[in-house]
Image: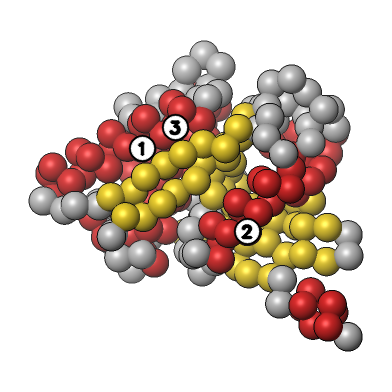
């Protein structure tokens, strides 16, 4: 049955890093109170940089030891990232702010280290079509790139309470009869979510995703 074999292939997960036994970085480690409460944008940028350093050869994007990653180095890294993607009163509630901050960080790394990392970033707004969002997210994972995702509000508060007003990183997907599921890294864990249900929040304030494009 062609469809079923087609479906079996509809799964892809990025290689991802562990830090002290946890899946990626964890905002809960931040001792700085502002970062602990509102540092999810910076944490998502830190995790993106670690990923690009470890798996895409952009080593200078992470200023510490990639082989021996630990919480202390991650906390230091988050403090380096903080001025670029600084938590505001309502957090980093616009993908544009995230893009601006991370572009500036990469540009400063290039200046300091003599590198020439070219990463274009675009946002796909949360008001966009769910099928288009799915196409973009799966396409990014297929290219070996994680996807920063910002969700602001959601009608299903109980189910998505940990994701409301929150940045996290999409690191895998799987398609089955129930739809498309995404694996996201957040708070040092891997969580599986139904993409369409997550995307169609039923609320006015939407968020969106950031699309990375690595220029050779």
Q: Residue, x 74% and y 43% (percent of image)?
A: 130
Foreground pick, 38 / 192: 192
Image: 145 above or below 120? below
Circle 2 SS class = helix
Residue 38 versus residue 123: which sits nearer the camera? 123
Contact (Cβ within 8 Å) of mark 3 with mark 1: yes
Q: Residue under circle 3?
A: 98
Percent position (x, y) of residue 27? 52, 40
Q: Position of residue 97 (x, y in %)?
A: 44, 26
Quadrant occupied by the N terminus = bottom right
Q: Nearer the viewer, residue 204 or 159?
A: 204
Give how far apart the Cα atoms at labels 2 and 3 are: 21 Å
From this viewpoint, which residue is outermost toward the top? 89
Badge 2 or badge 1: first in the primary sequence: 1
Please provide percent x and percent y for residue 163. 69, 36
Give the position of the C terminus as an image quadrant.
bottom left
Q: Bin the neighbour count of mark 2 within 10 Å (Cα to Cα): few under 14, some 14-19, many 20 and up.
A: many
From the image, tell me which residue sits under label 2. 138
Q: Nearer the viewer, mark 2 or mark 1?
A: 2
Alpha carbon of mark 2 to alpha carbon of mark 1: how far? 22 Å
Above or below, 142 relative to 159? below
2 and 1 marks in contact (CB < 8 Å): no
The residue beneath circle 1 is 102
Residue 72: percent from the left, percent from the top?
A: 37, 48
Classify 10 Å Cα crowding around label 1: few (below 14), some (14-19), many (20 and above).
Answer: many
Query: Which label lies toward us, 2 or 3?
Result: 2
Q: Tell me the quarter of the picture where residue 125 sits.
A: top right
């Amino acid at each position: 049955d062609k469809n079923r074999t087609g479906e079996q292939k509809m799964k892809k997960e990025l290689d991802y890093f562990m830090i002290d036994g946890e899946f990626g970085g964890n905002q809960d480690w931040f001792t700085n109170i502002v970062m602990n409460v509102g540092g999810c944008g910076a944490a998502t940028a830190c995790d993106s940089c670690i990923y690009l350093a470890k798996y895409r050869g952009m080593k200078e994007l992470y200023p510490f030891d990639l082989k021996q990653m630990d919480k202390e180095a991650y906390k230091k890294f988050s403090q380096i990232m903080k001025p670029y993607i600084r938590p505001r009163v309502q957090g980093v509630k616009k993908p544009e702010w995230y893009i601006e901050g991370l572009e500036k960080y990469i540009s400063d790394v290039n200046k300091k280290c003599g590198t020439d990392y070219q990463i274009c970033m675009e946002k796909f707004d949360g008001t966009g079509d769910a099928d288009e969002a799915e196409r973009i997210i799966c396409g990014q994972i297929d290219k070996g790139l994680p996807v920063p995702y910002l969700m602001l509000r959601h009608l299903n508060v109980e189910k998505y309470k940990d994701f409301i007003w929150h940045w996290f990183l999409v690191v895998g997907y799987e398609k089955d009869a129930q739809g498309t599921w995404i694996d996201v890294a957040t708070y040092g864990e891997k969580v599986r979510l139904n993409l369409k249900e997550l995307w169609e929040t039923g609320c006015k304030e939407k968020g969106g995703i950031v699309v990375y494009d690595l220029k050779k």
